[in-house]
Image: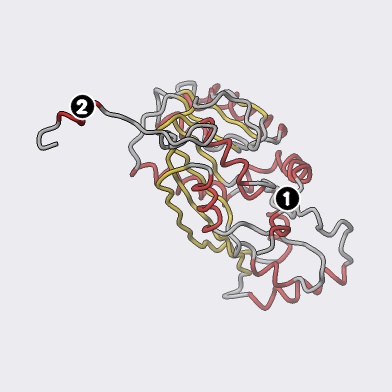
Amino acid sequence: METSRLLVDSRQVRRNFARAAGRYDASAILAQEVNRRMLARLDYVKIAPHRILDLGCGTGGSLTALGERYRDATVLGADACEAMLAQAHGEKSRLRRLMPFLRGARAPLLAADAQYLPFASGVFGFLWSNMMLQWLPDPLAAFREMHRVLEVGGLLMFSTLGPDTLKELRASFVDRDAHVQFFADMHDLGDMLVECGFSDPVMDVERLTLTYADFDDLLRDLRHTGATCALPDRRRGLMTRHMLGAVQTRYESWRQEGRLPATIEVVYGHAWKAPARTTADGRDIVRFDPKARFRPGG
């Protein structure tokens, strides 16, 4: 895939999510389902972090569950869209009134760019990111920052969208304008993790299918979750009724059992921050364990 197709207009992303913030929780079925599946994966990981960062926390959908799972940890949420954080603040206040025993409802929230995190190095034991990476212009820069702020032995766990996402919608446009976002391949993301110094990366993918009664329901769902195109070369003007009708007609060819499908490719990844192997100026680090010299049979 051409690099230009992975470019993202960050300002447009923030505008899209700001417009969707008030309706996001009622519409974000996909993000909520992926969140549940990520949480289930934590059952197989033994960690006891003191500080957790939910990067791209949005309206705070993961914060309560993380706080309940890791009761001794301080949980912090960060997101680039202040309107989404405002919704999270409102949800926190509601949860405090209804369920004051939930520690996750008290997590502090911070507006922050994932590519320039305002944290000292090595302060988090666990970094969680659900469905955020696909909206970054440079995932590699974000991975570098995630690696920096993790402590040695810390865990990164994330989900994002893969290139088959919305393939039916993409195929229904036949003009030369950009209408549907492009997403990075799982293998490319794994290579980025290794390049940034993460160890033992594990990547896997699953394909989910959302179904809709009609084409307008799909478009409405995308708008209400902020998941509309943010490519720099996207079509800027509104489509005519005739043009949109032609797209809808082509999409109808995908209808099965009375429903219109929308394929979602979900990429999952996790990796650890291992001790550094080189110094900042490129020299190799050799670790000496004096006890090793006196082991039986050594």
Would residue 35 be found to the left or right of residue 86 on screen?
left
> Which of the 4 image quarters holds residue 132?
top right
Amino acid of disc 2 = Lys
Q: Which residue is mark 1?
A: 8
Tell which of 280 and 226 is nearer to you.
Answer: 280
Would residue 21 be found to the left or right of residue 268 on screen?
right
Residue at point 82% right, 65% down? 177
Foreground label between 2 and 1: 2
Residue at point 72% right, 34% down? 83
* Label ID, residue 291: 2
Image location of residue 24, percent across then percent down: 66, 43
Element type at marker 2?
helix
Earlier-in-chain disc, 2 versus 1: 1
Please report contact status of discs 2 and 1: CB closer than 8 Å, yes or no.
Answer: no
Residue at point 61% right, 65% down? 262
Tell which of 95 and 208 is nearer to you.
Answer: 208
Element type at marker 1?
loop
Give neighbour class at mark 2: few <14, some 14-19, many 20+ (Cα, 10 Å): few
Image location of residue 249, percent across then percent down: 75, 76
* Label ID, residue 218: none
Above or below for 268 versus 100: below
Amino acid of disc 1 = Val
Tell which of 36 and 81 is nearer to you.
Answer: 81
Tell which of 183 and 100 is nearer to you.
Answer: 183
